[in-house]
Image (tube, rainbow, N blue to C red):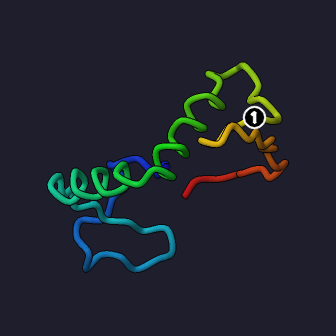
Amino acid sequence: MFQKRLSSMALSHGHLHEEGDFFLVPHPELTVDLRRSFLEKPASADLVNICLHWYRKPPKPILPALHMQNDLGEVTKIKLSSVGVSGAW
């Protein structure tokens, strides 16, 4: 997730002088192609489903663990690490 206000975006790629400067050029066709190729892979679809089941709308806490079953019926417990994020990127 990119957390910067568009109003703070550099005027062009030539104005990227300091750490944290950014410039965005939307490319809808590339976005559609990347999304399509991502979702064609079964592991990617699994990742999306894990995120959908794990996510909790704030202020609800995120579950500390989740069980996932493979196509053979084997269940794996996935634990959320205690790594935190601060700041913006």
Q: Nearer the viewer, residue 62 or 40?
A: 40
The percent position of residue 35, horizontal first and vertical second, equals 31, 51
Q: Amino acid at mark 1?
A: His
Depicted 64 relative to depicted 45: above or below: above
Q: Quadrant of residue 24?
A: bottom left
The percent position of residue 62, horizontal first and vertical second, equals 74, 30
Horizontal side of 13 relative to 39 (left or right) equals left
Q: Nearer the viewer, residue 64 or 25?
A: 64
- How packed mark 1 is, by other alpha carbons closer than 10 Å (few <14, some 14-19, many 20 or more), is few
Residue lying at 30% horizontally and 57% vertically, measured from the top left: 37
Horizontal side of 55 relative to 75 (left or right) equals left
Depicted 47 relative to depicted 20: above or below: above
The percent position of residue 86, horizontal first and vertical second, equals 71, 51
Horizontal side of 26 relative to 74 (left or right) equals left
Q: Classify the position of the C terminus by image quarter.
A: bottom right
Q: Nearer the viewer, residue 71 or 3?
A: 71
Residue lying at 80% horizontally and 41% vertically, measured from the top left: 77
Depicted 35 relative to depicted 48: above or below: below
Could you tell me which secondary element the residue under label 1 belongs to? Answer: strand
**Number of numbered discs:** 1
Query: Extreme left residue here?
Result: 29
Residue lying at 40% horizontally and 80% vertically, measured from the top left: 17
Query: Extreme front residue here?
Result: 72
Residue lying at 22% horizontally and 70% vertically, measured from the top left: 12
What residue sits right under mark 1 in the picture? 67
The percent position of residue 29, horizontal first and vertical second, equals 15, 55
